[in-house]
Amino acid sequence: MHFDGLAENNTVLITGTVAEGCVFSHEVYGESFYMFRISSARLSDKADILPVTISERLIDKELLQVGTKVEVTGQLRSYNNYNSKKNRLILTIFAREISLLEEADAKMENQIFLNGFICKAPIYRKTPFGREISDILVAVNRAYNKSDYIPCIAWGRNARYMANLEVGANIRVWGRVQSRIYQKRVGEEVEERVAYEVSVSKIELPGHGEQAETEQEAAEAAE
């Protein structure tokens, strides 16, 4: 991937098509931020629909019309949503740069690199079809003593490798940002929700010289 060797501990590169236009998100010190959604195709016939937060200073929001092809670089950030009855972790791609793409330049990219620390014990499981999966939560530090908490999911050999990692371990992760639709029962009703996570293709423990390579077919088949 293009991120090998970069000092940045949270880097996202994504290209795709604007799936939902800009809506106002929030304001910080007089600077307005907007959110839109980008559709990034997988190798399969599916696509990930991902939220992007962008400053009004980066681009005229009127240019981000549905169907427009864009390239975004930035970070995957988390924050707590206090508007609901239960505190929920919200993920968004925070744009640092954005550019419009011509049709000929619109090669789909979806890459992320994280350098952080495991903050919850990994959860290892098998699907009814025998596929091995591990879920981990990675804390990635950023400025002003803040951290982003990024859910990651690994498959096959990577899942077995991550299942044995301890809380507090420093880990480097390469992969893609994906969306996943799931159903949650709330009282008597079943709600359809969307989860965002990093599908891991490679992992590394700094100083250990160990890594697990990708199982691309399993990752692409993930929902």
Image (cartoon, rainbow, N blue to C red):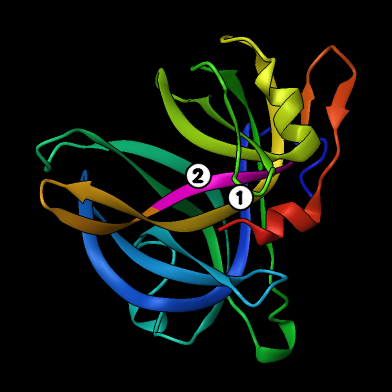
The C terminus - image quarter: bottom right
Residue closer to the observer: 109 or 41: 41
Q: Magenta stretch containing residue 198, yes or no?
A: yes
Point out residue 218 in the picture as x, y percentages from the top left corner.
73, 53
- Please give left or right for residue 219 compared with residue 222 in the image: right
Point out residue 92 in the picture as x, y percentages from the top left corner.
41, 50
Asked if marks 2 and 1 touch (Cβ < 8 Å), the reply is yes
Vertical comparison of 178 with 86: above or below: below
Q: Secondary structure at mark 2?
A: strand
Residue closer to the observer: 180 or 3: 180
Q: Secondary structure at mark 1?
A: strand
Instruction: Name the image quarter holding residue 133.
Output: top right
Vertical comparison of 155 with 74: above or below: above
- Please give left or right for residue 184 compared with residue 100 in the image: left
> Which residues are drawn in magenta?
195-202
Disc 2 target residue? 76
Magenta-drawn stretch, dominant element (helix, strand or loop): strand
Disc 1 target residue? 12
Q: Residues within 10 Å of mark 2 (few under 14, many from 20)?
A: many
Q: Residues within 10 Å of mark 1 (few under 14, many from 20)?
A: many
- Please give left or right for residue 23 compared with residue 67 in the image: left
Vertical comparison of 123 with 24: above or below: above
Q: Amino acid at mark 1?
A: Val
Q: Residue at x 78, y 58 (%)?
A: 217
The residues tagged by marks 2 and 1 sit, at their Cα atoms, a distance apart of 7 Å
Q: Amino acid at mark 2?
A: Leu
Vertical comparison of 4 with 110: above or below: above
Q: Residue at x 49, y 35 (%)?
A: 150
